[in-house]
Image (cartoon, helix red, strand yellow):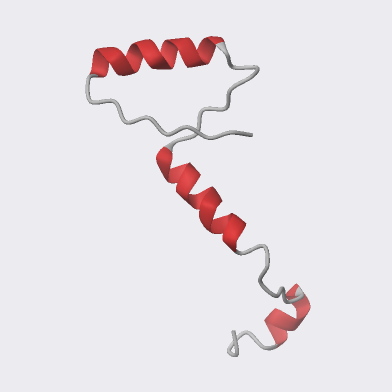
């Protein structure tokens, strides 16, 4: 998947771009900037060590 970020200053232009992208809804996923930033942060955690939930509960003060 490829990502493009667009900052649009004019509301009318934004509406036109949004209308066009919604026509491509089967091929394009529209994600808010906040959601996109969350996905980036989540992807960075994939290499981190995980702890089983039961162990976390037993040692919750440690984490």
- Where residue 34 appears, as percent x and y from the top left, is 42, 44
The residue at the point 59 percent across, 84 percent down is 63
Give the quadrant of residue 32.
Answer: top left
Instruction: Give 55 or 48, whichever is nearer the viewer.
Output: 48
Answer with left or right where residue 29 lies relative to residue 47: left
What is the number of callouts on the image? 0
- Where residue 47 appears, as percent x and y from the top left, is 68, 67
Furthest residue to the left? Answer: 10
The residue at the point 75 percent across, 82 percent down is 55
Identify whether 63 is placed above or below 22.
Answer: below
The residue at the point 36 percent across, 10 percent down is 16
Identify whether 1 is placed above or below 48.
Answer: above
The residue at the point 29 percent across, 25 percent down is 8
Give the quadrant of residue 51.
Answer: bottom right
Answer with left or right where residue 1 lies relative to residue 8: right
Answer with left or right where residue 1 lies relative to residue 37: right
Identify whether 9 is placed above or below 37.
Answer: above
């Amino acid at each position: 998947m490829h990502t493009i970020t667009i900052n649009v200053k004019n509301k009318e232009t934004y509406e036109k771009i949004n209308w066009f992208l919604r026509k491509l809804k089967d091929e394009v996923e529209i994600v808010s900037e906040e959601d996109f930033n969350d996905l980036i942060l989540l992807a960075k955690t994939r290499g981190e060590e995980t702890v089983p939930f039961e162990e976390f509960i037993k040692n919750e003060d440690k984490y």
